[in-house]
Amino acid sequence: MNLKKCLAALLAAVLLLSAAGAAAQGITLRTISCFAGPDASDEIYVDILRRYEAETGNTVLDSSAASDETWKTSVLNEFAAGNEPDVLFFFAAGADSRPILSRVVPLEEINREYPEIRLPETEALREEDGLVYAVPVRGYWEGLYVHTDLFEQYGAPLPRDWDSLLEAIRIFRENGIIPIAVSLSDIPHYVAELAILACAGQEDQQARPKTLAEVPESWLEAMRVIRELAEAGAFADNAWATYDSAAMDVFLTKKAAMRLDGSWFATSIPPAWMNTMEVLPMPRRNGDGVSDCYIGGVSMGFYLTRRAWNSARRDAAVQLLSMLTAPENVARLGDTTLTGHLQASAEDMQEGRMMLSPLQDSMSKNAREVWLLECIPAVADGSMTAEQCWEKVMALAPFGK
């Protein structure tokens, strides 16, 4: 055999060995989710991924991070750059999901090709085109968390109406306790949404105005409420500069008495505190008692991307999606592990009240970011009026033209 043939044979052998090695290593998939950081389900999520790897021989490269506006933008940027993952856990049936719908696969298409996995098409996640693209994992609600033991220690009334909320803020301020732990710099979302709920009834909250003149008066009042709370000393002095993770730590170390947050926050609460904590409906700004509505719904789910679907990774990606959305894993990822008084109060907060989707979920991305990250902090510190806030937001046609 001449030298050229020997080299050719050697090269062929190397290629065969490389191919065999690649086959032994399996397929590599990329995933992104927000099961990270303060979300107590992050370990469960990683455990599911590792079990998938062990059972299939495939590899999962995960890039999960805590959910905030930066994370949302980073995910959308990955899609815009054509670098989307194979499996994604992201927002659905709202402004956030619209930019990615052409790049993800409808569940009916997956079910048609893989009928054995029977992915559920949840009506709440149906998009404007009539299709469902995401498999939900957990529902959610938002409310006012309170340390009941701090209220007892300082003789503060539980905030079951607006006057008692302001009185509790005054008492805690005078005693060196931060009344409401919040970051106005990166996650002012709950302050914004629940201020609307404090002022608006169901009809106003669900309004989707096209012009500034159509903005409900209650939305203007809600912005004034945020300023009123700030002037009353409800927020920490550094609320405009701190991050939400730090604000959360302030509440969890009982340096703050209250926190506006969602049901996912409960996964960060030590079990021993479940009997000294409650979650309450938002007090009404005008009138007696608390709102007869609450913010909640199903807003996120698992997607399979077209990039995976149209590749040799399709079977592996579908198998991973099927495992992540299996009933037992949905139960694990969706379990907020509430017990005691906290569980009972969460049930009471929802019982007999109308569930409303967050206003921000209906907004365009640009308008939502302006409202939350520019207007809310400025309204709170008095450098922007309620009227200026909504003028700035409505100029961006948040609900379409």
Image (cartoon, rainbow, N blue to C red):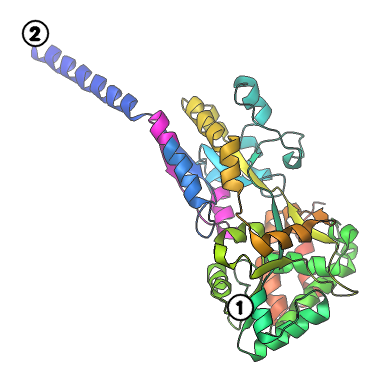
Is residue 290 toward the left or the right of residue 70 in the image?
right
User: In the image, what residue occupies the spot 45% across and 44% down?
Assistant: 47
Q: Which quadrant holds residue 260?
A: bottom right
Task: Between residue 379 and residue 329, name the one nearer to us.
Answer: 329
Residue 63 in magenta stretch: yes
Earlier in the chain: of badge 2 and badge 1, it is 2
User: In the image, what residue occupies the spot 17% across and 14% down?
Assistant: 9
Mark 1, other Cα within 10 Å: few <14 / some 14–19 / many ≥20:
many
Residue 254 in magenta stretch: no
> Residue 218: where, in percent of width, then height?
87, 69
User: Which residue matches tag 2?
Assistant: 1
> Residue 28: where, in percent of width, then height?
41, 34
Q: Is residue 82 above or below residue 213?
A: above
Mark 2, other Cα within 10 Å: few <14 / some 14–19 / many ≥20:
few
Is residue 4 toward the left or the right of residue 99 in the image?
left
The span picked out in magenta is 52-77
